[in-house]
């Protein structure tokens, strides 16, 4: 079965540079979520989109922005990168079905390293 | 504040030695409790969803159960390939997931 696809898998940047992470959800999934996971930490929710509109916001820095496009893929744009932004960034997707919470399915993440 | 506590933090088993992982939670208006498996450098892989107390789900050597305060992931006759970190995750009144810290399971041959 098709899974959530994230690109790139690995990304190395220097401080103050910008980065764009991409996420392609499972087909027919209408909701996308972004998470940041530091070493030995559980994933921290950043932001989510439903039907191309922002649906919830977590601990996303002002330097970051995200959007969901008409084909449901999403991009996380990160500017003025700092050393502390080094982490594994996960995208997850789900579909909204009335009356039941559908699980989020995760991609394998983008490992971002800031030098 | 919603909280999820998993125990033990780490568990070592011999192949074939059955055991259980515990997840205690306090969530306002539980809408779902999810179990995921995560391998190093990979994303969490969905295993089960439990919606209400008394519910049970099974998949191969894994069985998940739910009460009003806890969930258990029972592993029967584990194999080395079951080695991974198992995450318990809840979803309450909002869409946000609350993650436990995970139980790192190692199954020795």
Image (cartoon, coloured by chain):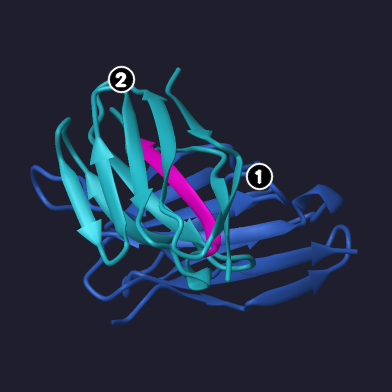
Which residue extends farthest bottom? Answer: A1
- Residue B20 percent coordinates (x, y): 41, 43
Q: Nearer the viewer, residue B86 or B81?
A: B81
Quadrant that contains the C terminus of chain A: bottom right
Q: Nearer the viewer, residue B56 or B91?
A: B56
Q: Residue at x 65, y 60 (%)?
A: A88
Q: Which residue is mark 1?
A: A41
- Residue B90 percent coordinates (x, y): 36, 37
Q: Tell me which chain appears cyan.
A: B
Q: Is residue B9 above or below residue B42?
A: above
As measured in the structure, the alpha-carbon distance from the residue carrying label 2 to the one carrying label 1 is 23 Å
Can residue A53 be spotted in the picture?
no
The secondary element bearing badge 2 is classed as loop
Magenta residues span: B83-91
Q: Residue at x 48, y 52 (%)?
A: B86
Which residue extends farthest left? Answer: A99
Task: Tell me the subunit letter for badge 1.
Answer: A
Left or right of A95? Residue A80 is right
Q: Nearer the viewer, residue A46 or A37?
A: A37
Circle number at residue B28? 2
Q: Tell me which chain appears blue.
A: A
* Main SS category, magenta section: strand
Left or right of B1? Residue B84 is right
The secondary element bearing badge 1 is classed as loop
Can residue B24 be spotted in the picture?
yes
Quarter of the image for residue B56 reads top left
Left or right of A50? Residue A81 is right
């Amino acid at each position: 079965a098709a899974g959530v696809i994230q690109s790139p898998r690995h990304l190395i940047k220097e401080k103050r540079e910008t980065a764009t992470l991409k996420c392609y959800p499972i087909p027919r999934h209408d909701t996308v979520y972004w998470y940041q996971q530091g070493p030995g930490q559980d994933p921290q929710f950043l932001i989510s989109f439903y039907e191309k509109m922002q649906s919830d916001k977590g601990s996303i820095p002002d330097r970051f922005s995200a959007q969901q496009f008409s084909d449901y893929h999403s991009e996380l744009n990160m500017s003025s990168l700092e050393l502390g932004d080094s982490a594994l960034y996960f995208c997850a997707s789900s579909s909204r079905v009335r009356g039941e919470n559908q699980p989020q399915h995760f991609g394998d993440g983008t490992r971002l390293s800031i030098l | 504040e919603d909280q999820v506590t998993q125990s033990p933090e780490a568990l070592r088993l011999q192949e074939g030695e059955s055991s259980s992982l515990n997840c205690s939670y306090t969530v306002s208006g539980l809408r779902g409790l999810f179990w995921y498996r995560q391998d190093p450098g990979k994303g969490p892989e969905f295993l089960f969803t439990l919606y209400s107390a008394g519910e049970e789900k099974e998949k191969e050597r894994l069985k998940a159960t739910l009460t009003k305060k806890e969930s258990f992931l029972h592993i029967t006759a584990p194999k080395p390939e079951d080695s991974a970190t198992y995450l318990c995750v809840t979803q309450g009144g909002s869409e946000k997931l609350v993650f436990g810290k995970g139980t790192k399971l190692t199954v020795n041959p």
